[in-house]
Amino acid sequence: MKKLLSSISKCDTCASKLELGPRPIVSANINSKIVIIGQAPGSIVHASGIPWDDKSGENLRAWMGIDTHIFYNTEKIALIPMGFCYPGKGKSGDLPPTKECAPLWHQKLFCKMKDVELILLIGSYAQKYYLGNRLKRTLTESVKNYTDYLPDYFVLPHPSPRNNIWQAKNEWFKKEVIPELKNSIRSILT
């Protein structure tokens, strides 16, 4: 795994597309039990080099019911984005994750992690890539029917503060989905 992570850290496949240049951000361990697949690092994470080191990460940890000590323990949790580098700024937020990373690196990482019990698919990019035609018509429908993807995958919206409006419109998410997510995480980590 160390060799693979070292190779990923040197990857410059998408360098010409990246506004701030390549800085692959990923963390994993052969013993990781939960894998979180998100979109791509934002500019704050690009600067710090620490995955989910922003408000979205705070929200995600709260949803999961865990603290930073557990979240960043790679023997428990692997953090693997769809695009490993900050893609740059778009008109209404960050650009989509680059399409090269997941096909290039994900399977190689999963081949090293034999103890994975659950994969959290955060947002539509991860869900489309891993679930394909099993997805419902909208992200809301997919999240509402999250049990259709268990026990392998737990589908979630992105925990960005930009999604607070979505959460306010979909109160069932906090009442029904978050408690089940916390139960799933707790049962795997204890």
Image (spheres, rainbow, N blue to C red):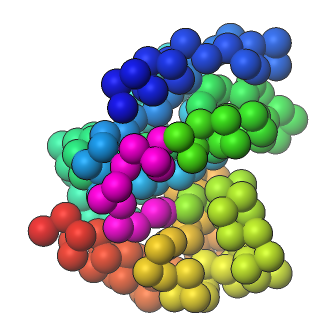
> 94 above or below 163?
above
The answer to whether residue 20 of the structure is visible from this angle is no
Q: Percent x, y for residue 81? A: 56, 42
Q: Residue at x 24, y 70 (%)?
A: 188
Q: In the orientation shown, which residue stands out farthest toward the left?
A: 190
Q: Quadrant of the N terminus?
A: top left
Q: Is residue 113 magenta?
A: yes
Where residue 136 appears, x then y in whole percent? Answer: 76, 82
The total number of labels drawn is: 0
For residue 60, side relative to residue 124 (left or right):
left
Q: As drawn, is 4 to the left or to the right of 14?
A: left
Q: Which residues are magenta?
A: 109-120
Residue located 66% across and 42% down the image: 102
Q: Position of residue 186 (x, y in %)?
A: 21, 71
Say which of 5 and 96 sits in front.
5
Q: Nearer the viewer, residue 35 or 49?
A: 35
Question: On the image, which quarter does residue 69 sit in?
Answer: top left
Check the image and report above or below for 162 versus 10: below
Give percent across and percent down for residue 71.
Answer: 28, 48
Please give the name of the residue rendered at 72% of the width and 38% of the height, measured from the top-left corner: 97
Image quarter of the C terminus: bottom left
Task: Decide whether residue 100 is among the magenta residues.
Answer: no
Q: Quadrant of residue 79?
A: top left
- Tell me the quarter of the picture where residue 127 sits: bottom right
Q: Say which residue appears at 55% left-offset and 68% top-offset.
A: 156
Q: Is residue 90 visible?
A: yes
